[in-house]
Image (cartoon, rainbow, N blue to C red):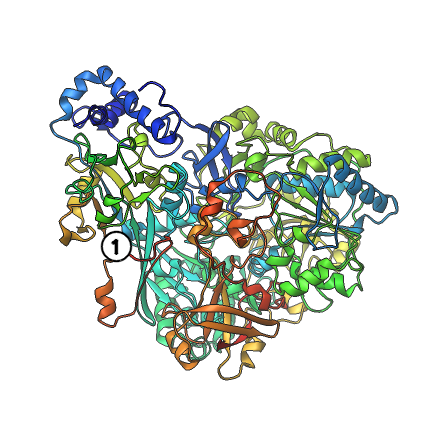
Amino acid sequence: MSNRREFLKFGAASAALAVAGTDAKAKKPAQFKKGGMDFSPETQKARQAVPTACWQCVTRCPVIGYVENGRLVKIGGQPESIRTGGHLCAKGQAGVNQVNDPDRLLHPLRRVGKRGEGKWKRISWDEAISEIAGRLKKLRDEGHPEKFMFHYGRMKGSSSKLIKSVFLASYGTGTIGNHTAICESSKWTGQELTWGKHYDNWDFDKTKYVLNFGSNCLEAHTNHTPVAYRLTTALVDRQIKMVTFDPRLSNTAAKSSEWVPIKPGTDLAVVLAMCNVIMAEELYRGEGEAFLKFCKVTEGADATTEEKINALKKHLAQYTPEWAAGISGVQADKIREIARELATSKPACVVSYRGAVTHYYGSEAERAIQMLAAITGNIDNPGGRCLAVGAKWKYPHGPKNKPKTKKLKILDGFNGTVSLPTHHVSHQVLSMIKDGSHGRPDVYMWYCYQPVYSNGDCKENIAILKDESLLPFTVAVSPFYDESSELADIILPDATYLERWDWEDMVSPNQVPEYYIRQPVVKPLGEVRDFADVCCELAERMGFPLGFKSKEEFVNQSCAMTPAVKAAGGFEYMKEHGVWHDPKARPKYYSYKKEVSPAALQVDGVIFDEATGVYWNWHKSKAKSAGEAGSTGYTRTKKSYKGYVGQKIGDKVYVGFKPDKVNKSGYFEFYSHIMEEKGFAPLPSYKPIPEHVAMKPGELILTTYKVNVQTHSRTQNSKWLSEIYHNNPAWINPETAASLGIGEGDKIKVRSEKGTIEISARVTPAVAPGVIAISFHCGHWQYGRYASGEKTGFGDLHDPDGARIWWTDKGVHPNWIIPNKPDPISGVQRWMDTVVTVTKV
Amino acid sequence: MPGDTRTASISRRDFLKASAAAVPVAATANAAVADPKIQYGMLIDIRRCIGCHGCSVACKAEFEVPLGATRSWVEYVERGAYPDVRRSFLPRLCNQCSNPYCVPVCPTGATYKRDEDGIVIIDPEICIGCGNCILACPYDVRFLNPDTGVAEKCDFCIHRVSKGLAPACVEACIGNARIFGDLNDPDSEISRQIATHPVSVLRQGVGTEPNVYYIDADHAGEREREQGQYIRITTHRKQQERR
């Protein structure tokens, strides 16, 4: 044995004794600590730990960045976080690769060749800002601020407040696009029509049964890690049952007690049939029946519970399990069995996501799912489907006298196509710009958004963005050279999320709000700047200073203005700890049951609306007088919901389910006057997907999905993720494959009304017959070497792994062949409705 | 070792010196190390594994493992006939065997099993990069680092464990599927869990005596495929063949 081995012999155990609390008998730590520290395997020195927040997906988990010699080397979970419990997914950990991406943009660029030609000149920030400020100021001075369109993909927390609520509001443009319609806006519209707000939290800590329609929350969800670790714990430690409806065996379906394959777009039918069973078999008795007191089920505002039950039974009688079986392919007995289990397992949690809602009538599916949770008594209760709880930050609002904003009518889809675009119809924006009948922006700027890659019909997106006669000036704000920034006239190199400040407020899965911040883990590389800081400078140059010079100052002031955070120690505390919650706070449930104080009903402007039973303050609406408000009524007065005070039920006035975007009452509305007025059935009702009704023999439905190591479009530059997931063969059931003569690994052509892609086939029983499933994520043609195989030529960071990319197949992007088509109710992009023909190459 | 401070492997060697220097401080403890000896091990509860690759990426980051190489990875095992299809996940790492095949084939003694905690390690200074150990390992957990030419594999994050921290993959696990601890201590959580659950190890028949255990692992493989069952085993590794 060598001397060195003698050294090693005593290494770990003795050092453990020196550092950690130990069990004297065993000569090792009593417990190995998880999180909060890390050490270099080379030098053994502690890595500097900086608390911050993730941005790889919208979950925005609190995290800790570990820095060695000024370089970010690792990201781990934040053990102090009540949302994550210290957990962090693969995507979050691979955020290291975002900062250290050898292809990232480090300087502002100006196009010198034709748009999209790929010829660029490095320019100074002063030149970039002068040019943009000059163009924006001219539009503003001419009275056309709306001709500046700002389109964001992901913008949350303080970034959203500073850029949208302060900078853009002070500038005066309302032509602000988002991306919710390519995400899940149908879910939100469905919720706004029923319980007012949007976002449902699933209380997995306390539930006894989970019924899941189309959510892949163990791989990809808007609250992924906080939800995934709670659900896993519930499944194993408490042995709860979970049933997942999905055309594909996602990992979530695989971990469920039962996977029920379903034909895409037919969840609505199954949910209605379950409601039918629960009403017909009187399984609503108990919590469900009690909850009906707070529900609007009939046209009138003051129906008795018995009348409500009768109305529901009557409406649902048509939706028998046998009827739904014929539509969905799920056996009638299975529908009955699960409906009974759901109704008798208390509490139970009804879950839904894109699989159920990104369809024609997707928002109707969400309304029906809300109804199913309601009649089983599983709304806003411990263990059920709860109204979201998040941090409530206060923040500086900038200049007092903001102009009245103007906007181009290109945000909500073509006239007559979408009835309730409560979250806009972003996938129609480029088409509406091309159409031009509602005007076009002179300046089109996008931020953390990939208009080319993230919407359907990529070819058309490229054509429109390239066309200078449609869009005379385009600006991309991005840390990376991707398929969209390629088509900009100026690229502003944004800081990555690990180089910037923010406060954050994402939903807490345990119903206790968590306050947390994002702070730079490393100094911004090259000349990159947080775009919010650039907004401060743009405002100053245009003559309306915002009152703070940077996002750091904005976050600092917000910490001082937010009472709970201030009391905890303010900005300094948040910088040190990253995260704070009130240790005395109790989880929030049943907020609708709270009674409104008599004093609140006596406030000036508060009136009672007989038709709905709503108390509301007309001053906060568009009504010009009390008389006008009274005669027009709550339902028909514009923006009346902004004055909502309470709902009269019997002889009491409750907080109820406060409206957020539409003039609904304070009831949990099954029966929607708003839907009725828009020409839809007032109670949740079935309508088949027209393209699916018209399908010819041999055609398949293309369904899309996300995997656990990639977000939709912006993680493929992360080498540790793309090494794991870089190509995306199309899943096809063996029976379907055999009927088309397709074998494992065969090259196939998938053709839709929009075009054809070539992709390889994965023949697997883990997908329903009649379906072809292709993930998002792959097939980048820009975005750097790890995503596309091509260097951008802009970065200058050394990364030896660049020469070690061992995979050659970069996969295929399905959006080339998916048309941009809105759900007629919410406007959501119908990702899962595309009909295709599949042939072997 | 005067003058030897340039390369990564040399820095690593400094750790060994530093550890040795710490010995006198804990001299009374050293006397007690020998009995009972620690055997570190890991228990992976597959019921809690959601196949998220959190462990794979944590390991990549912890050691900056080069692309194309893996110390820690996750296999997916999918089988059945529609609609009765199952998918199970099988996280993989060095088994820190009690009878490690990699040790006797090492011509220089660079690979050895530590007496005090049973972790199988590679002394980077002594390793000559011959690759014998890589061929010998029945689990394919070793690789030659393309930069240093030295064999590498999982060492249970000795540098963290020595500071009282759990290995990086244990900390990263979303489902809390991994339990790390002393298999020789009957009161440790890992020993208690193993005592109260049916557990298995990989390739039990080859006699390696692994110290990585699994609850509820699906060990399906080629035999099932030969029997005509649908079975798909996927890994994200460069080497697609499973050992």
Q: Position of residue A634 (x, y in %)?
A: 69, 57
Q: Residue at 45% of width from left, 71% of height from top?
A: A270
Q: In which quarter of the image is residue B157?
A: top left
Q: Nearer the viewer, residue A540 or A365?
A: A540
* Observer able to see residue A703: yes
Residue A23 in picture, x, y percent from top left: 21, 26
Percent across and percent down for residue A310 are: 49, 71
A149 relative to B191, above or below: below
Chain ID for label 1?
B
The answer to whether one can see residue A265 in this image is no
Disc 1 residue type? Arg
Q: Is residue A600 left or right of residue A240?
A: right
Q: In this view of the protein, which residue sits in the foreground, A357 or A539?
A: A539
**Residue A459 location, quadrant:** bottom right
Q: Which residue is drawn at 18% across and 29% down?
A: B116
Residue closest to the far left = B35
Q: Mark 1 points at which residue?
A: B243
Which residue lies at the image location 40% right of the left edge and 31% below the top edge?
Answer: A36
**Left or right placement of residue B203 versus residue B69 in this view:** left
